[in-house]
Image (spheres, rainbow, N blue to C red):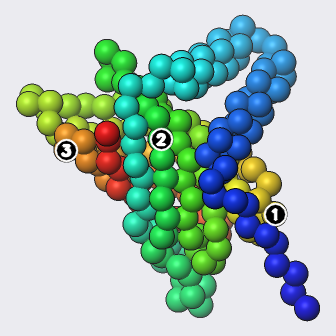
Amino acid sequence: MKFKFPKPPLPHFLKNSLLILILLLSFTAPLYSTDDNNYILQTFTSNISETFKNYSYYNLYIPFYMWHNRLMYDSYKTDRYNEIPLGLGFAVSRETICNIEHSLFSVAFSDSNHKLQITTGYTWQKKWYNSSQNWWLSAGYTAHFIQRYEYLYIPIPMALPVGGIGYKSFAIEAAYFPGPYNDGNVLFTWARFRR
């Protein structure tokens, strides 16, 4: 008989995951001893704190495609993987005068194995606007935790490159998950609506 793990309740996933992120970051602070590392960690945590307290807009995330790199997988695996990650996410964001966008987000979606995955974290992106300020490109990173069925929904830390293209309040963004052969190597894409 196969044991099924219960899914966490969705109404609390945003609050619980953000709390886990903040707690884990605060507990890792004493592990850094050099001045440079302290400065980096303090900047990182203060950006998270400032965004949490003084966000200026909301974002709705709608995951729509997960591309498994066919050069890094056997066709047996890719033929049975889910590549349409049905789900929904929410974020709070602020943008600085230097066109740096800071976001705190949480997204729940159907992963490659058709199981619930929850991803929660922080995104830093530099934006480059065109002359009319309507179109923009962005590039940066995301530092987040994933919670997956096969890991008993224990938060696993991860950092990934992220980028996107946007028009006014709409954007298409993506992050790439690297990995060894037959694991990882997924381009995860989502639509983002700013409100």
Q: Is residue 181 visible?
A: no
**Mark 1 secondary-structure assignment:** loop
Q: Residues within 10 Å of mark 2 (few under 14, many from 20)?
A: many
In terms of image quadrants, where is residue 122? top right
Q: Which residue is mark 3?
A: 167
Q: Which residue is mark 2?
A: 91
For badge 3, the amino acid type reads Tyr
Instruction: Tell me: 7 left or right of 47.
Output: right
Q: Residue at x 59, y 41 (%)?
A: 121
Q: Which residue is mark 1?
A: 152
Judge whether 53 appears above or below 22 on screen.
above
Quarter of the C terminus within the rendering: top left
Judge whether 31 appears above or below 138 on screen.
above
Measured from the top left, where is residue 191 in percent x and y? 35, 55
Q: Residue at x 55, y 64 (%)?
A: 109
Q: Nearer the viewer, mark 1 or mark 2?
A: 2
* Mark before the other along the chain sequence, 2 or 3: 2
**Mark 2 secondary-structure assignment:** strand
Q: Residue at x 49, y 64 (%)?
A: 87
